[in-house]
Amino acid sequence: MTDFLLELRSEEIPARMQAGARAELEKLFRAQMSAAGLDAGDVAVWSTPRRLALIAKDLPDATAAVSEELKGPRTSAPPQALEGFLRKTGLTQDQLEDRDGIWFAVIDKPGRATADVLAEAIPAIVRSFAWPKSMRWGKQSASSESLRWVRPLSGIVAIFGEELIPCEVGGISAGFATRGHRFHCPGEITIGSAADYADKLRACHVIVDHEERQTIIRDGAAKAAADAGLTLVEDEGLVIENAGLTEWPVPLLGRFDEAFLEVPPEVIQLTARVNQKYFVVNGAGGKLANGFVCTANIDAVDGGAEIVAGNRKVLAARLSDARFFWEQDQKKTLAEHAGKLANITFHEKLGTVADKVERVAKLARWLVEEGIVTPSCVPAQAGTQGGDAPASADERSGPPPSRGNTEVTREELADQAERAARLAKADLVTEMVGEFPELQGLMGGYYARAEGLPDAVANAIRDHYKPVGQGDDVPTAPVTVAVALADKLDTLRSFFAIDEKPTGSKDPFALRRAALGVIRILTGNGLRFAVAEGDLLDFFADRLKVQQREAGVRHDLIDAVFALGGEDDLVRLLARVKALQAFMATEDGTNLLAGYKRAANILKQAGEVSGAAAATPPTEADAALLAALDAAEPAASAAVADERFTDAMAALASLRAPIDAFFEGVMVNDPDEAVRAWRLGLLARFTGAVHGVADFSKIEG
Amino acid sequence: MADAAEKKLLSFQDMILTLHAYWAARGCAILQPYDMRVGAGTFHPATTLRSLGPEPWNVAYVQPSRRPTDGRYGENPNRLQHYYQYQVILKPSPADLQEQYLGSLAAIGIDPLLHDIRFVEDDWESPTLGAWGLGWEVWCDGMEVTQFTYFQQMGGYDCKPVAGELTYGLERLAMYIQNVDNVYDLRFSDAVGDVAAVSYGDVFLENERQFSKWNFEVADTDTLFAGFKAAEAECQRAIAANVPLAAYDQAIEASHLFNLLQARGVISVQERANYMARVRDLAKGSCKAWIDSQSERWTANYPGWTL
């Protein structure tokens, strides 16, 4: 058993690709080993910006010898068959065994030295390595067939035990030599084996284990902040990214001019993170402080003073830009900014963003005027509640909105919703959002507040893109709900109107996300109205199934309710589905389903019923089912009409005993045509009654 | 450049001279700027056209670059509508390109054990040139000082072999080396005897004021539109006449006129893509014509080479 070390050294690998590259290296290595019949066992994979490394522990020294048996033709077969078999096996006739009149070839394959397997595997791994983007380089790139790698591949170390695995790929031969840190230790270093690899690199200012570098950054950044009496704002993404940019990470704390803190904290954090990959820090009271932590890649000779000074300068330039945008944007009102939306195409067939804003404003007003979104926004009750519990607080900053203090009238709410909708997209043409598109909405909210717009309007502008992702809050403030819903509904209706629907993995206008947002807003707030029709309603049904699956709701039950047709109120639909799901979990439910399926089968096989039905119930069991139906049918339909879906299920449950007794007591296909016709008629009525609540044919089980 | 302190504070022009000497010593022909208005050093035919084909090509040059929309009337300490790029092209890309580049930073006074130098992913793409490459932006203490790219395609054609391109932002580097916060405070040249030092602002501040005004407010848009059309037509005529270098000049002209029209704010979002596609067609057409005019010699001198 021997350890194997592979290092693939290259020019700087993008930080974001390193995790994928580690997984790819391990996957390809394991595949190569298993194809050769070797168990790769314990494999460790590491990455730095300049190298990918793999250590496989305790590989066998050779593959196992195998003996393969091939069955040939009968000894009595014509000579051509035997000749063919000899050609195929490469043997002569005297090497074959005659077993009960059948030729057998026994081929012994000796084990291969693992070193030989590795020498073939390494070039194969390099050649088939899948990078998100790869390139050609150097002299050899005069040919299109030259090796591709993420950046120029510069060296290979391949050592099995203490032996070099001789191999070559793309003009690079494996050797014992690698390089240490680019600046601290630029010369070649010689690796002896897998055992000394990490230590030798460490001695040359390279920490090859990415997780160790992450820990150094995570802990070091926190300590640098704590030493200055500050708290690091944790950011695991930044930890990983900085670990992918350094071989010898050294977190350093710097300060920036306090005057920049007048810029919104989100802007400062984004500038620092996105442009510079710095952490930010909080001061006392959890408010953003004028500090940052950058991660250097060297132990600087001056302890990092010059590095911090340089980084501070770059950040200052960035923050000056941000402050310039912040001030510049506020020289105009949002309404003035919104004027420019007429110059931006939303979609060539759907006009400008200004056109969209106009539609959204009207729709937001309509949602209020129709009483769908109400000033109290107390969810209208519809049986059971939908999937999303409304977020308890919608406000993150600023004084509390008017909601809860003095309730606005419907007319006031309609005005606010329309006003917020007209301003909601204005920040798209501000300098700040031009620079940081991810701040859309948020900046609009800041600017609205700064110009003195009501909080409800400012909050609606800020939050109207919500909910954005799975875990994002669902808006509950009435103005926000109206604008957020109108914006998404308009997007869906507009793109469906021009037949730009998502297909397969293609959803360029993020319509699935918009539909999910609508569903969550509707169900989270219990909003009741006909949300869509036709294709778009079907699209909602699909999205609803996906969304509800995660909440544990069975998709077949959603189908069973949608299949009834005419349901365009998603809140009511879900209430019905949930009552149905509860019912299907009971014994009555499963038995009724079994009875239903039996009835439906019989009806299907019966086809057209010929002959007149008997005038009266032929037996007592017939009479009992008839009586039960007479009672349950009107009870179920009345309950459905009143949206008392649990009651509707109870009415169906009352049919379970009579239908079971019916199937036990009578034979539907009675020789007497009149009796048969009567019973088929009764079963049709039974399935019809069930369909009044849900289409049970769609239910699985 | 005698002692270390002086070396660290190279004037703007000494920095250029140092880079010239450095790259000349590594076999580069030191070219002069192209005599047309361009947005970046990449537009110089010594990069665009010469990165095509199998012939080795090692050059370095300064290229004045114009980005009309970046004008700030001389009031922003970092942004200019006219600035300088230092461009190095090494074809094929040498195996030690990174080391050669780091050597150039050391030559202008950047100590890599005092300053944090990093290669941060930044893939380059020029839609108007139909070109792309992979590489990095090089950071020095968090500031981007160079674009480092391995060209993969130019004018829609594979680069065979690949050229390495280094584009230094000279003003940024100089501000860093001289430790000044405002570009106009850069020392352009040093005092010599009775002759006073010249600042970057002495040379360019008034230019920034006037050109910002012209770019944003004055330039006659009808003339610009007409110029664009004329350049487009002339480019196609030159392609047809098999003079691709002349055609490419017109592609450059069209590209710059498009940039000016954008600064004047008269190109709508919808039209923008359309104009860019037209410029790309001119650039690609010029590249193709250049390849057509050269490929006989290329294939004769480099057996086995194919497009």
Image (cartoon, coloured by chain):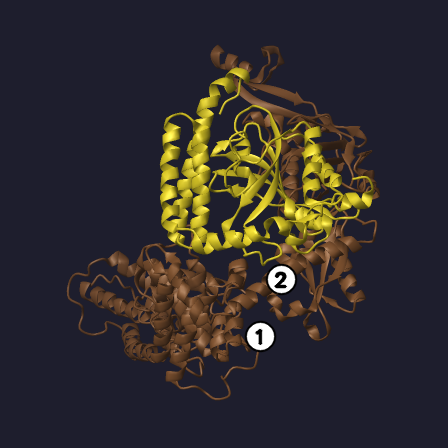
Q: Chain A colour?
A: brown
At x 71%, y 55%, the residue is: A311
Does dot 1 land on a helix, a strand or a loop? loop
The image quadrant that residue A485 belongs to is bottom left
Asked whether the viewer can see residue A64, the reply is no
Q: Amino acid at mark 2?
A: Ser
At x 29%, y 64%, the residue is: A667
Residue picked out by circle 1: A396
Q: Quick one: label 2 or label 1, which is nearer the N terminus?
A: 2
The image quadrant that residue A371 belongs to is bottom left
Quarter of the image that includes the N terminus of chain A: top right
**Nearer to me, A109 or A686:** A109
| Chain assignment, label 2 | A
Q: Amino acid at mark 1?
A: Arg
The image quadrant that residue A651 belongs to is bottom left
Q: Which callout, 2 or 1, points to the residue nearer the camera?
A: 2
Residue picked out by circle 2: A320
Q: Chain B colour?
A: yellow
* Crowd band around label 1 with a 10 angstrom C-alpha radius: few (<14), some (14–19), many (20+): few
| Chain assignment, label 1 | A
